[in-house]
């Protein structure tokens, strides 16, 4: 993306999409690095059975936590709505 456009004309939606895309590229690069390290470690006798076990990433944990939080939030909201309708 052109710097002038990004700084002067881009909408907040475009900026958010751009930042999310760059973050995703970074995650993909780290996943490729983890795969290479995992293969080398397995050849060397590592006892880790999965790449996630061998080298966990903090963003993977956050996604799982967010899903659990969202489910609990939705359940709480559903209970409040049921009480309002009674």
Image: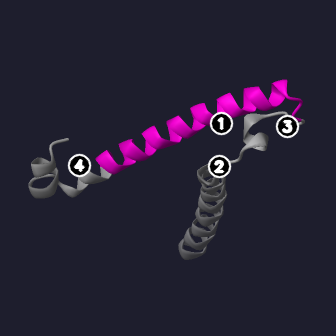
CB atoms of marks 1 and 2 within 8 Å: yes
Q: Position of residue 53 (x, y in %)?
A: 78, 42
* Residue indicated by mark 4: 14
How far is the residue under mark 3 from the one under mark 1? Answer: 13 Å
* Residue indicated by mark 3: 48
How far is the residue under mark 1 from the one under mark 4? Answer: 30 Å
CB atoms of marks 3 and 4 within 8 Å: no
Q: Nearer the viewer, mark 1 or mark 4?
A: 1
Q: Looking at the image, is mark 1 or mark 4 earlier in the sequence?
A: 4
CB atoms of marks 3 and 2 within 8 Å: no
Q: Looking at the image, is mark 3 or mark 2 earlier in the sequence?
A: 3
Residue extent of the magenta highlight = 17-46
The stretch drawn in magenta includes residue 26: yes
Residue nearest the viewer, comparing 70 with 51: 51
Residue 82 placement, left or right of 39: left
Determine the residue positioned at 82% across, 28% down: 42
CB atoms of marks 3 and 1 within 8 Å: no
The disc label shown at residue 7, or none: none
Crowding near the residue tagged with mark 1, few <14, some 14–19, many ≥20 C-alpha atoms within 10 Å: some
Residue nearest the viewer, comparing 21 with 80: 21
| Helix, strand or loop status at disc 4 | helix
Locate the N terminus by quadrant: top left
Q: Position of residue 20 (x, y in %)?
A: 38, 47
* Residue indicated by mark 1: 34
Q: Looking at the image, is mark 3 or mark 4 earlier in the sequence?
A: 4
């Amino acid at each position: 993306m052109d710097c002038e456009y990004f700084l002067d004309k881009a909408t907040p939606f475009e900026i958010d999409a751009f930042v999310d895309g760059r973050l995703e590229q970074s995650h993909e690069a780290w996943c490729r690095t983890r795969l290479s390290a995992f293969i080398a470690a397995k050849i060397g006798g590592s006892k880790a059975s999965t790449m996630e076990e061998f080298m966990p990433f903090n963003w993977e944990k956050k996604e799982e936590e967010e899903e659990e939080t969202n489910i609990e939030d939705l359940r709480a909201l559903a209970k409040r709505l049921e009480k309002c309708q009674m």
